[in-house]
Image (tube, rainbow, N blue to C red):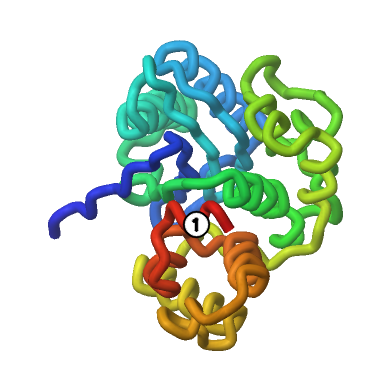
Amino acid sequence: MARIIRRKSSTGVYHVMLRGVNKQMIFLSDADNLRFLQILQQVKDVSNFALLGYCLMGNHIHLLIQEREEGEPLDKIMQRIQNRFIGWYNLSYDRCGPLFGGRFRSEAVEDERYLVTVLRYIHQNPVKAGICRRMSDYKWSSYGDYADGKALLEGLVDTEVAEGMFGKNELLRFFDECSDDVCLDDLTPEEMEKTYFSIYNEISGGCFDEAFEKLSWEQKREIVENCKKKGVPLKKLSEYTGMSCYKLRKL
């Protein structure tokens, strides 16, 4: 089967997910988690990318990565991360073979609102999974870097990108809001398409193309903002509304 070509992000920002082969556990001890973060730091120094957020769960990993103009592309970055960690992991556990289930998955993050939505989704992952009651209780995510500056590894997370967009206090208030965000998850592209369509249809009340065009500016803006908060990509909103991504950004 031919590989699906990854959609290029105009902002250079990608939400990336790695899952254990056959959905098996990746991190069996705190040492495994810490080593993965150390490898992230090493690869950052080599590949020159920004790490905007992360969450290490038992059998999967969420990363929010921004390519830099003078740095390496996402495929190369992820190849370095996976190869280094798999080499260390297999040696440590006297095992061989793959650790991750196929290629990493990614989605392009095209605007500021969706960027902070992805960050909230990543940080709320352990709470929604029932691992902890509060985001601050979970050690292996970047929430602490944003909330109190208590980084597990100094300089690993580039918090200034998101904080520069919204301000630290506003960002933390947004993280704390209850949400049912739909971001990159363990769904097929077809399932994600159905999910996006369902969200838009419910929020807009079935206003597609010409029906959307007849709405007031305020109504259009409210629909678009609410859909973006739920994780519907701008490209999909363009398909549903008949408006260009440029015009949607102006709402």
Would residue 57 be seen by someone viewing this image from the given angle?
no
The mark total stands at 1
> Hey, what amino acid is under mark 1?
Leu
In the image, is 230 to the left or to the right of 23? right
Would residue 167 be seen by someone viewing this image from the given angle?
yes
In the image, is 199 to the left or to the right of 91? right
Foreground pick, 207 / 164 = 207
Residue at point 43% right, 50% down? Answer: 107
User: Is 162 rendered above or below residue 158?
Assistant: below
Q: Which residue is mark 1?
A: 184
Furthest-left residue in view?
A: 1
Foreground pick, 2 / 132 = 2
Residue at point 63% right, 24% down? Answer: 158
* Residue 129 image position (x, y, % from top left): 70, 61
User: Is 173 rendered above or below residue 218?
Assistant: above
Foreground pick, 103 / 181 = 181
Foreground pick, 27 / 242 = 242
Furthest-top residue in view?
A: 45
**Res 238 quadrant in image:** bottom left
* Residue 124 image position (x, y, % from top left): 72, 53
In the image, is 200 to the left or to the right of 132? left
* Residue 212 image position (x, y, % from top left): 50, 79
**Res 203 quadrant in image:** bottom right
User: Is 134 rendered above or below residue 145?
Assistant: below
Residue at point 63% right, 62% down? Answer: 225
